[in-house]
Amino acid sequence: MTYLTVYTDADAPETLLRTEDPAEVAAALKEIDVRLRHWPVVDGLADDAGQDEILEAYRDQVAKVVAEEGYTFVDVAQLHPDDTPDWAERAAAARAKFLNEHTHDDDEVRFFVSGSGIFYLHVGGKVHAVLCEPGDLLSVPAKTTHWFDMGTTPDFTAIRFFHDDDGWVGDFTGDSIASRIPDYDTIAAGRS
Ligand SMILES: [Fe+2]
């Protein structure tokens, strides 16, 4: 279930809202033109399912979104803890990639098949931290200032939708806002 926390973007950010209520979450995101939809999670997908298997499991839903919104490219991004010696290094590198505020020329659209991650949307003097979980389909419009935190132990599988091959390139704003807002680990730990 999606968990939303809204902060001010001040030097000492204040928490304005904390909610798991689907209607409240949807209303708050609608105000900033971010779409959140929910798909039923397909049971029986193996933990180590590959891209083809995952896209096949969600074929109808993916086809519908592609047809409606004209995406030309769909793939699967996933990262799960493993026993390899370089796991910690790979996890930290993956996390660091989009941990600072940036924009894209394309929409950023993600469906969470498993695991979780937080999209931070910096719009209108506020930061909406959207903790996405399995079944959540989040659409962040092109040019929205945002960042993404997968936490210190990344564990997620997500279907990604693109309009063009270069749309995912990050244009970094240089704003240090991301360092002032609670990170994934802090928000996830404080949730209950
Ligand atoms: Fe991004």
Image: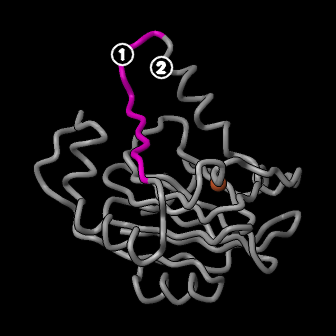
Looking at the rendering, the stretch of residues picked out in magenta corresponds to: 74-85
Q: What residue is drawn where x is 78% and y is 67%?
A: 13
Q: Which residue is mark 2?
A: 87
Q: Is residue 1 above or below residue 159?
A: below
> In what element is the residue under mark 2?
helix
Question: In the rendered image, which quarter contains the N terminus?
Answer: bottom left
Residue type indicated by callout 1 = Asp
Q: Mark 2: which amino acid? A: Trp
Q: Position of residue 118 (x, y in %)?
A: 54, 57
Q: Is mark 1 within 8 Å of ligand 1?
A: no
* Quarter residue 29 falls in: bottom right
How packed is label 2: few (under 14 Cα within 10 Å), some, or many (20 or more)? Answer: some
Question: Depth check: 83 or 180 in front?
Answer: 83
* CB contact under 8 Å: marks 1 and 2: yes
Q: Residue at x 71, y 61 (%)?
A: 105
Q: Is 30 one of the magenta-colored residues?
A: no
* Residue in the image at 21% along x and 43% along y: 53
The residue labelled by disc 1 is: 83
